[in-house]
Amino acid sequence: MTEGAQNAGLQVNPAALQTFATNLGAEAGELTGLGAGTAFSTAVGALPGTDFGAVAQQSADVVHRCLARMGERLTTVADSMRTAAGSYEMAEADFTRALTTIGLQLP
């Protein structure tokens, strides 16, 4: 350990985690709602009598599923962060209660 280094420990800001989780959840919703596959859907009837319509529809479906899946994953991360923030808040409240019970106070 270097001279003068301090053991700061883990410091968590539950409010910052909550804010980040909320913003990430909103981004996930916007990503899912993009409907980027609709551009391909418009092209489905562009070249009648060819296989282009089927390929364009497959592309639309794939893009839609990919965006929905990415949105779901971001939502899962946001939910986990929200849960973690709540756990940190609870742990701090429990610790404060325990110290108060024995007559000590947090600095």
Image (tube, helix red, strand yellow):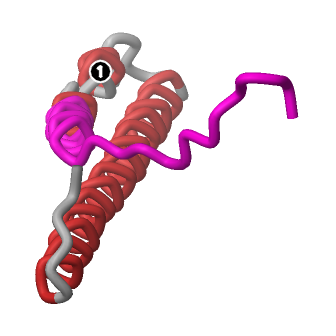
Q: Nearer the viewer, residue 43 or 99?
A: 99
Q: Which residue is mark 1?
A: 45
Callout 1 crowding tier (Cα within 10 Å): few <14, some 14–19, many ≥20: some
Rendering coords of residue 97 (x, y %): 13, 79
On screen, 97 above or below 64?
A: below
Q: Residue furthest top?
A: 46
**What residue is shown at x 20% (from left), y 72% (from top)?**
104
Q: Magenta segment: does it hold 16?
A: yes
Q: Residue at x 16, y 42 (%)?
A: 15
Q: Is residue 49 inside the magenta stretch?
A: no
Name the residue type under label 1.
Gly
| In this picture, residue 47 sits left or right of residue 15 | right
Question: What residue lies at 29% left-to-right and 49% top-to-bottom?
Answer: 78
Provide the residue span drawn in magenta: 1-27
- Which of 28/100 is in front? 100
Which residue ends up furthest to the front in the rendered image? 103
Q: Secondary structure at mark 1?
A: loop
- Give the residue at x 29% y 63%: 88
Q: Position of residue 26 (x, y in %)?
A: 15, 34
Please identify the quadrant where the N terminus is shown.
top right
Residue 84 seen in the current view: yes
